[in-house]
Image: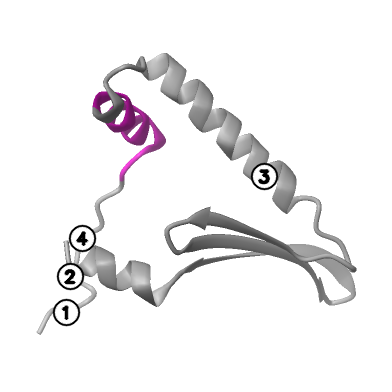
Amino acid sequence: MIDTFDVRKTKISKKQIIRDTAKYLGDYTVAKVEQIYNAIRDTITNHLATANDDKMILLNLGNGMSVSSKIKYVNGDSRLWMHSKISRYKNRAVNDL
C-alpha cells in the first residue's frame, strides 16, 4: 500500500506545456503556442468572471473537463467561487494509459 504522504508531486509548468505542445504540433513555434495558450487562458478567465447572482458560468473544456464559476456569499460578502471537474470517463481513460 502506498503511503500518500510519501508520494512526490511532479509539477509541470506552463512553459513545459507550451514547449511540449509546440513539439507535438511541429508546425508551430514556441512563441506562437504561447500566444495561443495565453489567449485561451484570458478568454476562459473573462468568461468565468462574468458570473453574477443570476448566472452561473460553466465552461466545457472538452474531453470530460469543465470549469464553473458562481457567486457565493461568505460572511455577507460576495465571492466568485470556481470549481473544476473531471468526468469519471476521463478519469478512467487517463488511468488506462
Write down the residue under mark 2: 6
Q: Position of residue 36 (x, y in %)?
A: 51, 26
Q: CA separation, marks 3 and 1?
A: 36 Å
Q: For the magenta stretch, what is the residue range?
A: 12-23
Q: Position of residue 71 (x, y in %)?
A: 80, 67
Q: Residue furthest left?
A: 1
Dot 3 amino acid type: Thr
Label ID, residue 8: 4
Q: Residue at x 57, y 58 (%)?
A: 60
Q: Check contact, mark 3 vs mark 1: CB within 8 A.
A: no
Residue 81 can be seen, yes or no: no
Q: CA separation, marks 2 and 1?
A: 6 Å
Q: Residue at x 37, y 30 (%)?
A: 18
Q: Check contact, mark 2 vs mark 1: CB within 8 A.
A: yes
In this rendered view, identify the residue nearer to me: 78 or 40.
40
Q: Residue at x 44, y 64 (%)?
A: 64
Q: Earlier in the sequence, mark 3 or mark 2?
A: 2
Magenta region includes residue 17:
yes
